[in-house]
Every structure is written in C-alpha cells, then in structure tokens.
Amino acid sequence: MALQVYNTLTQRLEPFEPLVAGSVRMYTCGVTVYDLCHLGHARSALVFDVIRRYLEFCGNRVTMVRNFTDVDDKIINRAKERGRAWDEVAREYTAAFSADMQALGIRPADIEPKATEHIAEMLEIIGRLVDRGLAYAVDGDVYFAVRAFPGYGKLSHRSPDDLRSGARIEVDERKRDPLDFALWKAAKPGEPSWQSPWGPGRPGWHIECSAMSVKYLGEPFDIHGGGEDLVFPHHENEIAQSEGASGSMLARYWLHNGFLTVGGEKMSKSLGNFVTIRDALRRFSPDALKLLLLSTNYRGPIDYTDAAAAEKTKAVAGLQEFLRAADALKAELPTVPVAETNGWTVHPATTAFRAAMDDDFNTARATGALFDLARDGNRLLQAARQSGVESDAAAALSAAALLRRLAGVLALDLGTGEAVVTRLADISVSQSADEALADLERLLTAPLPDAARLGNLVRELIAHREAARQRRDWAAADRTRQGLSAVGIRLDDSKTLCRAIADFSPETGLPPLHLIVRKT
C-alpha cells in the first residue's frame, strides 16, 4: 500500500505524492519562546520528526523548516514581569527549546528561522496584499480583509459567518469586519518595533509563517503541519494571506496532531495542568516518554498520566533487554553474519511496520511491530543457544539490527549503539578495587556524571573481580560485585564473557549501560 495521509484541507485520506518525486518539503509551526515547553509541545515536535524520518526511510530527501516566534505579546509581557529585555527572554527560551529537544532525542529541523530575522519578507507580502485590495491600513495598523478573500474558511470548513459567531474575536471598532486580523501592529511605547511603509510597528502572529515557509520552501510546498488548535485561526489566516498575495496554493497537504490531555483537558499553560519536558525527563527516560506519545495515531488525543509513562518504561526495558542479549550473543559468536540492510526490506517485521506507517503514520501499530520483532528475536536467541546452529544465531542478530533500525524511524534510541566488547587483557588497572568503587560512587552522585569515565571505572572493577576469581579470593570478588550492585549495576557471567548492565534513573542524565568484557 502506498503512503496515505489525512489531509485537513480535504478531510479525507489521500495518497501522498510529493510535488517533486523523491523530494519532500515540509513546514511545521514552532513555539512562541516565552517559557519552558511542556509535553504537549513535545508531542507535536515528535510527530513531525517521525513523519520526516519515515519519509526519509522511504527514500525521500526531506527539507524541514520549523520556525521560532521570537516577538509576540506573550514574550513582551513576560519580559515586563521579570524586568528584562524582550529579546533576552526570547533568546533564553529559544535555547531552552533546543536543549529540551536534544534531551528528548528529537532532531532539529533543517532550517529553524526566527520571526525577527524576516521582517523584510513579511513587509513585502503585506505590501502586495494592500496593493491587491486584500488588506488596509488604519492608524499604523494593517488588517487583512477576510471578506475580500473568497476562499476564507476552506481549511476549517466553516463559512466566515460561522467563524465569526463561534470564535473569540479581538474587539476593534476600526476594523471593517470583526474577523479581519492584524498583519502589522503599530508601535506602542516600550515595545519592539521596526520601520514599515505604514509607520513603525511589529508583525502580527500569522504573517511570519507565510513569509518564512515560502522563503525557504517555495510555493506550493508539500506538507504544512502543526497542532490541531492551529487550524483556526492561525493556519486559516496563513492560507488567506499567502494565497491572497501570490495567487498560488500554499501547501498541498495539511497535517494536524491531536492534543495531549490531562484528565481529559488539553495540557496548556493557561489551565495550569502542564508538565514541562524537563520535569518529565527527571522522572522518565526519553524513550519511555516518546513511546507514550506515539501510542496512538498522531491525530487522536492522548491522556497523560504518570502511570502510563511508568508502563512505557517497562516496555522500553523489554526491548533493551533483547538487544543486550543479542549483543552478548554477537560477542560470543563474532563471526556469525548479520543480514545487510537490503535484506531487511522483505522481512515480515518491515512489511508490518511499513503497512502501519503507510496508514497515515499509524505509530500505535508500528510500535506493535517492534514488540513483535523483539518477541520473535528472543525465540531465535533461545533457539540459537540450544542448537548452536549458526543460522539461528544469524537470524537473531539480524532481528536485533532491524529492531534498532525501525526504532530509529520512530525516534526511539533504545541505547542503539551496540555494546563495546573489551578484552580483559586490554583493561588497565590504575587503583585498588576499593578506590575504584569509591570513585564510582562519587561519579554517580556528581551533577553531570561523565559516561565515558563511568565505563572505564566499571571495566576496571570487572578486571579486579576477575583477578580475584583467578586467585580464588571469592570474598574480594563478591565485594566488587556487591559494590557494583549497590549503585544499580549488575554483572552477568558466562564462560567467556562478563556483562555489566544498568538502567540509571533519569535524574542522573546517564544513558543505559551495557559493557561486555571478553575473558579469554
């Protein structure tokens, strides 16, 4: 089945066909940078990152643009509350958003423009709208004349009369129609402003996306995305001003993600029921949160609870355990071949995964394909251990490699780097076991623990333990094992390998640990 997407513009599923074969241009509305982002923002960012990743997985070259609204009433008001400069506040929360996305493992957009850097492009569009009779100036403000654009309401599928009666509209007697919206706002004392043909002022909210999307993607482009709360008025207004200025379609497919709710209500700052990304990451791993956010189709709502996130933590641990076991098998049988990437295209798991994602990016079914693959992989691992047959081992290792690949399409990391195998003879010992254990405890309680240093300490302690076992000092070997166990690191032994495994609390900022030391 070819990829089908639900287009808000037509209200139906449609085959996805990029305007230029093999190349997809997509624009998604970013955040207004006046505060830390919550999990609702994370959901939208994740949805469109996964859509991009899947389009790339299907062989497309994707150009993704996501903007920052860095001048707005909310930013100005927050700056006044704190006695700071508005642009200082904007820079702080722009950096915070990028840091939060990195912590979650969500890729940045290819282009991340800021509104304040595109004033000239906005003024050009506004000027064309005025020239065409689609906009008018009043006392330094410029408004879009909604009734003059025949297609207004085509995205929200409501007539201007319906929209007027059902919308919250800013009262301004100078407007020709209550639905008319601001393209340019006249300067006010103490607020940022730029020069324009209508006097000093700053842009309205909607015009920035028209200017930035067309500048970087041309017109029309393939996909315009955002949260469902943006359908009206933001995206409706964006279509009107863009298409009114150019006479061309703005975007071919309009995709909108559903709300993240708490107790059935939309998570939002205005309701005070939000959980910031940073607070969530202090309690749950990035993969657990992302798995939760992908647990239903992107267009539907998700109700957030701590219990649901805890459940996804256990689910992620099951996938990680299979990958660890596969890594151990590979370390024991390093010559067993693993299927190349081309061989994965016909794997049943790939078929199921693609069928799910081709159905309007159905990540709920796609994650199910991952768990089915891990279940089958565990059976293959058991068969390989019992039979010793190379083909069983190869199939198990191929399943693990494929799981990593498909998980990556869903932005799930799973500690995807294969465990590094170190020979016991290559480990250097620089201190006693007791000193190394004390060093390990200090490292794990440090504000920013060094993951590389952690790995070296654990390898050193494994070397101490093996040396104690060789000289039959079982008490010393047990003390080392118990010391590691006390900080959450367990050791699993076989005849030829020792594995160190740990899933650290999210508060530590450490990724899952999986080290393999070859004894012989």
Image (cartoon, rainbow, N blue to C red):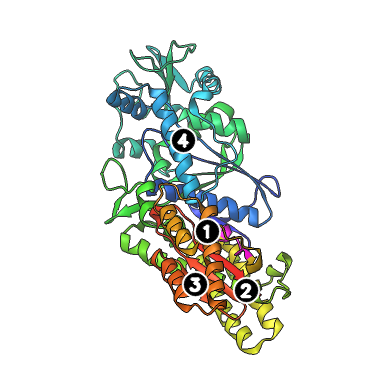
Q: Mark 4 points at which residue?
A: 95
Task: Give the crowd class for mark 1: few <14, some 14-19, many >=20 residues within 10 Å.
Answer: some
Which residue in the structure is indicated by mark 1?
431
**Which label lies toward us, 4 or 2?**
2
- Asked if residue 363 is positioned above or below residue 261 in the image, the reply reads below
Q: Which amino acid does label 4 sit on?
A: Ala
| Camera-side mark, 1 or 3 | 1
Q: Earlier in the sequence, mark 2 or mark 3?
A: 3
| Kind of residue indicated by mark 3 | Leu
Secondary element under disc 2, as helix, strand or loop, is loop
Residue 294: x, y in percent?
46, 59
Q: Earlier in the sequence, mark 4 or mark 2?
A: 4
**Residue 491 numbered tag:** 3
- Residues packed near mark 2 inside 10 Å, few (<14), some (14 to 19) or many (20 plus): some
Q: Mark 1 is on which residue type?
A: Gln
> In the rendered image, which quarter contains the C terminus?
bottom right
Q: Residue at x 39, y 48 (%)?
A: 277
* Amino acid residing under circle 2: Lys
